[in-house]
Amino acid sequence: MSKRIDVKDLNVYYGNFLAVEDVSINIEAKSVTAFIGPSGCGKSTFLRTLNRMHEVLPGARVEGEVLLDGDNLYGPGVDPVTVRSQIGMVFQRPNPFPTMSIRDNVLAGVKLNNQKISKGEADALVERSLRGANLWNEVKDRLEKPGSGLSGGQQQRLCIARAIAVEPQVILMDEPCSALDPISTLAVEDLINELKDQYTVVIVTHNMQQAARVSDRTAFFNIAGTGKPGKLIEFAETSTIFNNPSQKATEDYVSGRFG
Amino acid sequence: MTSTLTPVRKRSALTKGQLPKYAPYVVLGVALVLGAAILALIGFNAFGWGVVSAILFAAGLVGWSAAVEGSRKAKDKLATCLVVGAFLVALLPLISVIWTVMVNGIPGLLNPGFLGTSMNGVTGVFDNRAAEGTGPVIGGIYHALIGTLQITLLATVISVPVGLLTAIYLVEYGNDRPLARAITFFVDVMTGIPSIVAGLFAAAFFFAVVGPGTKTGAVAAVALSVLMIPVVVRSSEEMLKIVPNELREAAYALGVRKWRTILKVVIPTAISGIASGVTLAIARVIGETAPILVTAGFATSINNNVFGGWMASLPTFIYTQILNPTSPSNPDPSSQRAWGAALVLIILVMLLNLGARLIARVFAPKTGRR
């Protein structure tokens, strides 16, 4: 239940502004890939192109190919909704639906699409997803309470449970821990480690230690200056990026000399 | 030779140079007495007493404060006086209106049969008898109440779908396109249309489509919805705009289609604001008089069919009772009925406003931790 992603010569635009230039990257199935780099270098923008969330913004567009197990996401006639149901996403800020209970939040992907599901199946799916997100024991007694009443870390894990409830092939995480305290961060990182047994995980992070802790491979993005497009500088095994990078810019960044 | 010197002070050094707590009350008392004295010289009246006392109070308190506390505190006191004064001035007409309507309206409202009977068959003969004291004031507002409720309900049924769908187009699909900008502009223009023009439009429209002289409750409802739609569009648009984009993105990322996202995430999140906006729009049009006069006419008997025949409503009832009293020689029973109808109308608007608050609270997203 996981697919690989191959990106070929991808250019990402906001209107006429080239935000990310010429990225080619191969993301392995059942692994954790981390994107690191300074603010504004385009790593989140690039991540959002991987499930066609980029084009939700007015004027945003993409040139190039993104292949999910060989199928081009940007091919003619591809429905972005199909893409997004296969490639889930967790956002920087926890965003549970405020009108829904915890249980309905987990079932959102099913219920919002009006798929029929029996109560027994729904219960099983809720428990499986919440266990998968390490949240079951904390919320099992208050599934009917609103999701916005949880703590920030619990809300973020609820969002992860919501994402895995639709059983995607790939999970994209856009700085999932940046709004969380260290304990919640640890919970989410443990979860990422478990998720990679079943899913392909791509995570954007500002925290280099986090990239070193959770990822198998790391991509370093950088930007030449304000108004210039972001570029993929180096992509390798995480240990190589942090211990023996081939590029000077990567070494400067991971050793804390800038950024 | 060691002695501990404990400084004995009556007041803390940190609170030195402040007016005592009772200062405003002292100044108020002095201002009231002085104001009464000044007014006594030129002829006493309550309104002048209030104005003079308020000016004296502000001057006295600010002056005292400037002498004791310094200019910063004095400016603060001056600003407080101005803000409270403005609030009282704004409150005055409201209280005055409610008071007048209550005093004049309650006798009519308490009249038996006022809410349950119409004006059908009530002629000047009965009113003359009532004025002479040989009979009761008869006649009521049942027909007008029915008319107001039916016309307003139909106007709401027309306006809410049109207004809400327009707002959804503007917020979710408009993307600042020329069409969206044109709609926004014309909605703004519509907000400023005088209500009589809306009435003329609806009347002319039905004259052209159905036939000359078509006056029914439905025509009035169309006129009212011309006035209501821009209000509904505006309030719903604002409510949809404040739904965080993150929620839309969260739904998209789950593979939910855009229209489902709008229907099941965006609207439920904004429903409390939309519902209270709609209620306030109803409260806005329920008291319209001019457009109903030219579209529904005025009836004295009960008409339960909003699509056929002339129909009364509370505002037009008040208008005709005052302007054309049932008994021209003894207008008092008519004006008593008019005041009673006015009180009922105000109570209706007040209930709608309370309803808006209740709706907002019931539908608001729950955030409790328990």
Image (cartoon, helix red, strand yellow):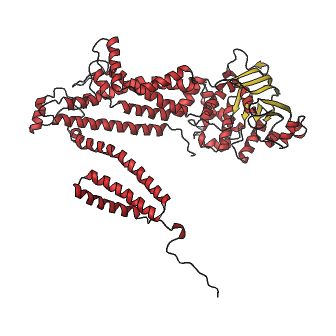
Judging depth in this view, the residue of B105 and A226 nearest the camera is A226
| Residue B193 point in image, percent of width and height | 39, 25
Total numbered badges shown on the rendered structure: 0
Q: Residue at coordinates 49% horizontally, 74% vertically from top-left?
A: B10
Res A2 visible: no
Res A75 visible: yes
Left or right, residue A44 beside residue B86: right
Image quadrant assignment for residue A255: top right
Q: Quadrant of the N terminus of chain B?
A: bottom right
Image quadrant assignment for residue B291: top left
Image quadrant assignment for residue B28: bottom left
Judging depth in this view, the residue of B7 and A171 nearest the camera is B7
Left or right, residue A47 beside residue B346: right
Q: Residue at coordinates 85% horizontally, 31% vertically from top-left?
A: A235
Judging depth in this view, the residue of B289 and B250 nearest the camera is B289
Left or right, residue B325 beside residue A134: left
Residue B199 vertical placement versus A95 (above, below): above
Q: Residue at coordinates 57% horizontally, 21% vertically from top-left?
A: B177
| Residue B139 point in image, percent of width and height | 19, 32
Residue A258 vertical placement versus B42 (above, below): above
| Residue A68 point in image, percent of width and height | 77, 22
| Residue B200 point in image, percent of width and height | 33, 20
Q: Residue at coordinates 36% horizontally, 49% vertically from top-left?
A: B88
